[in-house]
Image (cartoon, rainbow, N blue to C red):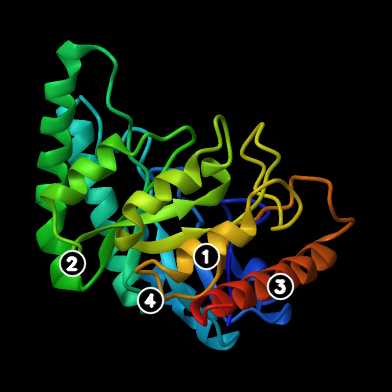
Amino acid sequence: MLSITSDYLKDTGCPQPYLQHIAEAGFSHVHWCHQWTTDFIYSRPEIEQIARWLAEYDLHILNLHASAGIEKNWNSPREYERLAGIELVANRLQMTAELGADVAILHMQRQPLDPAEIVLYWDRLHLSLDALEPEARRLGVRLALENYDDDSYLEVQRLFSEYSPAFLGFCYDCGHGNMGRGEGLDQLERVKDRLIAVHLHDNDGTGDQHRVPFKGTVDWPRLAQIIARSSYYGMVNLEVITNYPDFDNETAFLAAAFAAGTRFSEMVDQARQGG
């Protein structure tokens, strides 16, 4: 079984064609990414229609990429925007649960460089997470905080010391980890016991290209070994998109993604067996 992002072409608009093509390519699950960069609130008719499409194409939601928001932002220093951002994330938590998944992935802002802003930054983070935790626990959905490029993991390590793994875990994005100094795998080793989601894609280290695995410079054998020793036992989840000219058309892209996902899944299985 393999999962792929729902927005491999475009992250807004009607998702139905993507779901149909994903199913036709052989994938069993979807990492829901539509509207993750917007302030979009999913309403009851929209969630119910997505559920009907999933049933029609025999697909399942592995996890959902929650929106950090633009003007509804759970990290915002503007209090009304922060509160609106909590409502936006809560909307995604509810959607995640209703579609049968149990992990919602979320971006966070880095700690500011200005010492005068650091205390306020952490106060906002704690207020927002404290507000979201009861709703997440009620719904049975965990939040996974995602790494960014050149991430020191300062923020997530502190938060993992303050919040239970029953509420807060980690999503490793190997493309982000491969950028800049390329120290993502070294950092992942430090928090692999909190790993509950993965975003798997490739790049050449110069940008966030979201290429199909084995098309760039990510150290896939080492990543397979770390995942095999981590707390993550979910399926391979590809966060790949078609804006890089590796393939002539969508069908070829999906076929290559499925083949690469299968190959990496076998690598993780072999690592778990001591191979």
Q: Secondary structure at mark 3?
A: helix
Amino acid type of disc 4? Leu
Please state the horizontal and vertical placement of residue 160, each as a whole percent of the image.
20, 50
| Residue denoted by label 1 | 225
Amino acid type of disc 3? Phe
Q: Sequence order check: which comes first, mark 2 or mark 3?
A: 2
Please state the horizontal and vertical placement of residue 235, each as a whole percent of the image.
50, 75
Where residue 166 is drawn, which disc sits there?
2
| Residue denoted by label 3 | 258
* Mark 1 and mark 3: Cα distance apart in space: 21 Å
Amino acid type of disc 2? Ala
Q: Nearer the viewer, mark 4 or mark 3?
A: 3
Residue drawn at point x = 67 percent, y = 42 percent:
209
Q: Secondary structure at mark 1?
A: helix
| Residue denoted by label 4 | 99
104 lies left or right of 133: right
Please state the horizontal and vertical placement of residue 252, each as a whole percent of the image.
84, 66
Q: Secondary structure at mark 2?
A: loop
